Image (spheres, rainbow, N blue to C red):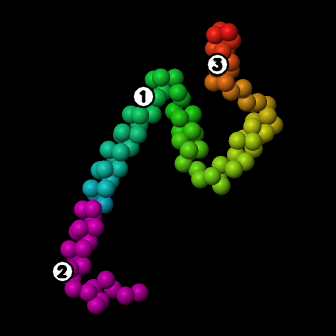
Amino acid sequence: MTKPTQGHNMNGLLKEIKEGVDSVIQLKKERAEINASIAEVRSRMEAKGIKKKAFDAALRYLEQDEEQREGYDMAYAIARKAVGLPMQGDLFEDEVLAQEGEAA
């Protein structure tokens, strides 16, 4: 293993280390602010009746690429049925059908 000072200008290395430490400290502050903003959005959704875990699950699903999503819905529905937790019907489709029936 080579020593950090070997082949380096010590003052230059010390300066780079200090800049690196300062950068990481600043990034951690920014991350804390971003995390607080995310938590605020999640809390707002929960106040509207959307559970944080459900919101997070929808977000994770959205972030998957098409290949990752392929077959997920069917596999999830089958797995839920297997453990006795069948999926409910499409709540929005049922609502649309009810509204169309009222309009007729």
On screen, 26 above or below 49? Answer: below
What amino acid type should be assigned to the residue bearing mark 2? Asn
Figure quadrant of the N terminus: bottom left
Residue found at x 20% / y 80% = 12
What amino acid type should be assigned to the residue bearing mark 1? Arg
Q: Mark 3 touching mark 2, by CB under 8 A?
A: no
Measure the C-alpha gap from mark 2 to mark 1: 50 Å
Nearest the eye: 99 or 81:
99
Task: Indicate which disc, 2 or 1, sits on the residue closer to the N terminus.
Answer: 2
Which of pointers 3 and 1 indicates the residue nearer the eye? 3
Q: Which residue is mark 2?
A: 11
Q: Residue furthest right?
A: 82
> Bounds of the magenta span?
1-23
Q: Which mark is residue 82?
A: none
Quadrant of the image occupied by residue 101: top right
Q: Which residue is mark 3?
A: 95
Quadrant of the image occupied by residue 25: bottom left
Q: Is residue 89 visible?
A: yes
Residue 65 percent location from the top left of the image: 59, 53
Element carrying mark 1: helix
Residue found at x 36% / y 40% = 36
Q: Which residue is mark 1?
A: 44
Q: How many marks?
A: 3
